[in-house]
Amino acid sequence: MDTVIVLDIAREAVITVLKIAAPIMLIALIVGLIVSLFQALTQIQEMTLAFVPKILVIFLSVLVFLPYMLATLTLMTEQLYSRIVTLS
C-alpha cells in the first residue's frame, strides 16, 4: 500500500467525520450562545440551565440528522471497500 493512498484515505475519513459532526456541533454552539445570552441578560447563573437545553437539542438534532449521518458513513464505507477490492 502506497503512502499516497493511506493519506488519501485518512483525508477522506477526516472529511467524513467533519461532515457528520459539523451540523450537531453548530446547533449546540448556537443553543449555547442563546442560553449564555439569556443568562447574561437575566443574571441567572444556574448551571443546569446551560446544560439541559443543549442536551435536549443535541439529542433531537441527532435524531433529525441520523439519516444523513448514516448515508454519509455508508458512502464512505462503500468507497473504502471498493478501494480494498482494487488493491488486491
Image (spheres, rainbow, N blue to C red):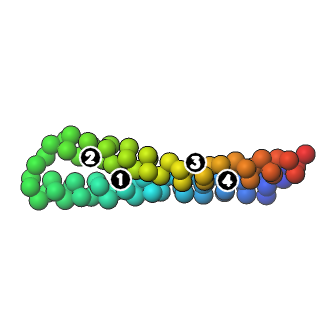
- Specify the label residue 75 is tagged with: 4
The answer to whether marks 4 and 3 mark residues whose Cβ atoms lie closer than 8 Å is no
Q: Earlier in the sequence, mark 4 or mark 3?
A: 3
Question: Which residue is found at the position 9% from the left and 55% from the top?
Answer: 42
The answer to whether marks 1 and 2 mark residues whose Cβ atoms lie closer than 8 Å is no
Q: Measured from the top left, where is residue 79 in percent x and y?
A: 74, 53
Between 68 and 21, the one lying in front of the other is 68
Q: Which residue is mark 1?
A: 28
The type of residue carrying mark 4 is Leu
Between 80 and 59, the one lying in front of the other is 59
Mark 4 to mark 2: distance in Å? Answer: 32 Å
Q: Which residue is mark 2?
A: 53
**Residue 72 appears in the picture as rendered:** yes
**In the picture provided, is 85 more to the left or to the right than 77?**
right
Please state, as top left, top right, bottom left or bottom right, where the C terminus lies in the image: top right
Crowd band around label 1 with a 10 angstrom C-alpha radius: few (<14), some (14–19), many (20+): some
| Figure quadrant of residue 26 | bottom left
